[in-house]
Image: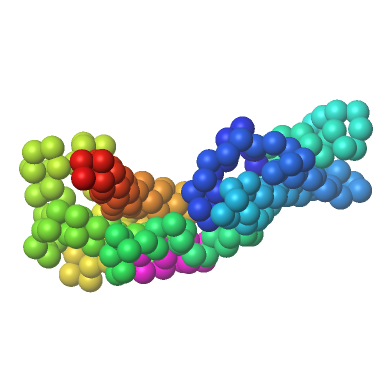
Amino acid sequence: MKIDQVHKCPYCGYMYQVVLGQNTYSNLFSDPGGTVAVHSVIYVCPHIACGKVEVAVDAGSPPPRKGNSESERHKARYDLPNAFFSSRLLPSEACGKQEFNAPEVPEAVFRDYDEACRLLRCSPCASATYSRRCLQGMVRKKFKLKPGKFMNEIKTLSSMNGAARQEVIDALERARKIGKFRAMPDDDVKVLVDVSYDEAKQTIDVIEALLLDWFIAPAEQDRRIGALKAILEGKSS
């Protein structure tokens, strides 16, 4: 797995500079025959209000040897060739990020998002279904649309001048198609097509981006404006 120079804490969302040996620790273990290697990375959030630990592990073929000493090799930034396993152990991928379990995010929306994350590994198809329902709920809540078919709701959103960028419309339409065959029993679907892990994960990524853009960021902006208003009113008095 690649260790980026800047990392975002999955618990609190804090962005920080990665420093190996201080807030990030990397180790490589391989079998005596040199056929399989396991790479583990531990991140410790340096934010004083957080400090939580994230653990990620992947497995694959041993990479080319880097560095002359064992300590140097352990500090190297490995990308294992032919990786056949990759997972985040802490916090578990089997749950949604708690930063989205905020008052401004509708409870039903977070429940569907959380369920999509829990199903991702064991059933990408089921995960995509919950992601589709989550996105439909987000569109209805954000733009106050009357419940109907998701396809028609996306068309309505597209016709609302300036409501959403074309990239967002395209992402919603793709998520609708991926999860369509499971979400709506009355849809005219004759063949069930498998959903890959990557497709289901990308749909979850769309949810997380829109949760930030549609719900979290506007609420934070309102709080900042409210604080500024309070300061100005205090000075005027």
Nearest the viewer among 119 and 160 is 160
User: Does 85 appear in magenta?
Assistant: no
Q: Give the vertical position of 40 relative to 73 (above or below).
A: below
Q: Image quarter for residue 145?
A: bottom left
Q: Position of residue 6 (x, y in %)?
A: 58, 35
Image location (x, y in percent) of residue 190: 25, 63
User: Foreground residue, 26 or 202?
Assistant: 26
Left or right: residue 110 compared with residue 13: left
| Left or right of 159 in this view: 101 | right
Dominant secondary structure of the magenta stretch?
Answer: helix
Q: Which residues are magenta?
A: 109-122
Residue 65: x %, y % from top left: 83, 31
Q: Between 86 and 49, which is closer to the camera in this rendering?
A: 49
Say if 89 sits above or below 161 in the image: below
Kindly identify the residue that appears in the image at 8 percent across and 43 percent down: 160
Q: In the image, what residue occupies the spot 23% across and 67% down?
A: 184
